[in-house]
Image (spheres, rainbow, N blue to C red):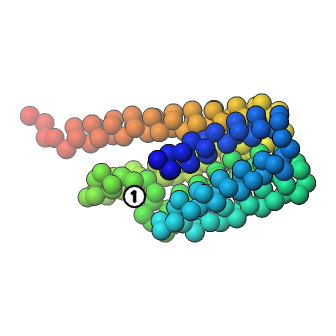
């Protein structure tokens, strides 16, 4: 239950900042950012990527400190950029220090993943890396140059829709690849 609440709080962060800035100073919202990052890192304790989440928490603490010190909203709005950078690091590092993240997830349901499946999951991990670069770039643009409403809309809704579309698209492609491979493996009658 706590993990779901943390996920919902993380997903709602841009909207909380947007609506919060209408009522309180950025320095007051800095505590939300620091607490959220610390809770995310604590929730990942004991996982292989825990160190990455602690680095992310440290980055968030720096952003929160800057927001509190200068009473500016920009550091608060940079948190989605930091999250994308952290996910890019997680997925990217897994390509070199394997297995790739998507392969690890696939092995939860298919422990005996064949070589073709390993290549496929590697490619999907690479696609996610590209997504995090683009999504993080748009998050940076909206934080620095867009209206607060545009920032909240993109980072609090559009980016999640894009994640869902990428996940759904990958699922459809995976089903198509499996049918194609099954048809190739079946000898013609």
Image x and y of residue 11, in percent = 60, 41
Mark yes or no: residue 117 visible.
yes
Image x and y of residue 33, in percent = 71, 52
Q: Nearer the viewer, residue 126 or 31?
A: 31
* Residue drawn at (51%, 33%) of the image: 165
* Residue drawn at (83%, 34%) of the image: 22
Q: Residue furthest left?
A: 189
* Residue drawn at (71%, 39%) of the image: 16
* Relative to 80, residue 58 above or below: below
Mark yes or no: residue 48 visible.
no
Q: Nearer the viewer, residue 7 or 99?
A: 7
Q: Quadrant of residue 137?
A: top right
The secondary structure type at the circle numbered 1 is helix
Image x and y of residue 115, in percent = 31, 58
Count neighbours of disc 1 (C-alpha within 10 A) and say few if under 14, some if 14 to 19, many if 20 or more.
some
Which residue is denoted by mark 1 in the rendering?
104
Q: Quadrant of the C terminus?
A: top left
Image x and y of residue 68, in percent = 85, 55
Q: Quadrant of residue 41?
A: bottom right
* Residue drawn at (53%, 59%) of the image: 43
């Amino acid at each position: 239950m706590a993990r779901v609440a943390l996920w919902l709080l993380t997903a709602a962060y841009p909207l909380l900042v947007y609506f919060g800035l209408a009522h309180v100073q950025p320095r007051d919202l800095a505590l939300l950012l620091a607490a959220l990052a610390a809770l995310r890192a604590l929730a990942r304790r004991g996982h292989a990527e825990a160190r990455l989440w602690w680095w992310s928490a440290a980055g968030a603490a720096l952003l929160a400190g800057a927001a509190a010190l200068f009473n500016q909203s920009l550091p608060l709005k940079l948190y989605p950029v930091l999250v994308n950078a952290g996910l890019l690091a997680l997925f990217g590092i897994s390509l070199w220090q394997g297995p790739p993240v998507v392969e690890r997830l696939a092995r939860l349901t298919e422990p005996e993943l064949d070589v073709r499946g390993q290549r496929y999951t590697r490619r999907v991990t690479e696609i996610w890396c590209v997504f995090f670069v683009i999504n993080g770039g748009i998050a940076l643009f909206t934080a620095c140059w867009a209206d607060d409403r545009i920032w909240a809309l993109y980072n609090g809704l559009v980016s999640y829709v894009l994640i869902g579309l990428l996940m759904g698209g990958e699922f459809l492609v995976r089903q198509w690849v499996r049918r194609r491979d099954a048809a190739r493996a079946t000898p013609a009658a």
